[in-house]
Image (cartoon, rainbow, N blue to C red):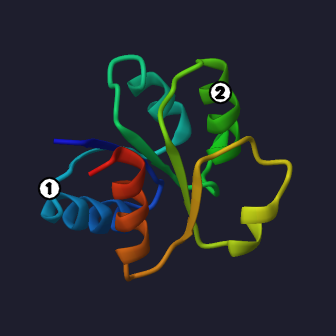
């Protein structure tokens, strides 16, 4: 079973993603902020990360900077309500960008593609 690591500050979004991905046969581990996520990555090795960018604290950008310093080879999908961020050159590299929506079909398909599921 593929493991998704979801980093999102909004509890309603975490609940929705958890329900949808578990229905699709994935295991999902979640963190409410970037700082907690970085701590959790020391003991969890997911198959893919789904990351919100706009969060309190160091946020998604700070997470990406520290994640890349960790040299982990984990595919990373940004899930953001702000489509213009997809082309923001100041954001550290990521594997895919999906605009948040109530319909998670595009996100589920992208995760499947990245984990070979």
Q: Position of residue 114 (x, y in %)?
A: 42, 49
> Mark 2: few, some, or many residues within 10 Å (few <14, many ≥20)?
some
Element under disc 2:
helix
The answer to whether one can see residue 93 in this image is yes
State the residue at coordinates (23%, 42%).
2
Name of the residue lying farthest toward the right: 89
The label number, if any, that marks residue 65 in the structure image: none
Q: Is residue 29 above or below residue 72?
A: below
Which residue does the numbered mark 2 point to in the structure image?
68
Of residue 27 and residue 110, the one placed in the foreground of this image is: 110
Please name the residue shown 39% across and 56% down the image: 113
Instruction: Report which residue position mark 1 lands on.
Output: 25
Q: How many marks?
A: 2
Q: Can you say whether 73 is above or below 11 in the image?
A: above
Which badge, 2 or 1, is on the more N-terminal residue? 1
Question: Where is residue 83 shown, x and y percent of the image?
Answer: 69, 73
> Is 43 left, or right, of 26 in this rendering?
right
The percent position of residue 40, horizontal first and vertical second, equals 39, 26
**Is 79 drawn above or below residue 69 in the view shown?**
below
Residue at x 74% of width, y 64% of height: 85
Which quadrant would the N terminus be assigned to in this image? top left
Secondary structure beneath dot 1 equals loop
Which of 55 and 66 lies nearest the eye of the viewer? 66
Q: CA distance from mark 2 to mark 1?
A: 28 Å
Determine whether, in the image, residue 19 is placed left or right of residue 63: left
**Would you identify the image quadrant in which residue 17 lies?**
bottom left
The residue under the point 62% across, 49% down is 56
The x, y position of residue 102, in whole percent, is 39, 82
User: Is residue 104 at least partly visible in the picture?
Assistant: no
Q: Residues within 10 Å of mark 1 (few under 14, many from 20)?
A: few
């Amino acid at each position: 079973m593929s493991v998704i690591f979801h980093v999102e500050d909004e509890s309603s979004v975490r609940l929705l993603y958890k329900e949808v991905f578990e229905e699709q046969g994935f295991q999902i581990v979640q963190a409410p902020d970037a700082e907690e996520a970085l701590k959790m990555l020391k003991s969890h090795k997911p198959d893919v990360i789904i990351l919100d960018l706009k969060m309190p604290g160091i946020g998604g950008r700070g997470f990406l900077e520290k994640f890349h310093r960790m040299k982990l080879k984990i595919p990373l999908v940004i899930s953001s309500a702000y489509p213009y961020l997809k082309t923001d050159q100041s954001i550290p590299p990521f594997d895919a960008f999906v605009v948040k929506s109530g319909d998670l079909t595009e996100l589920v398909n992208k995760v499947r593609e990245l984990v070979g599921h």
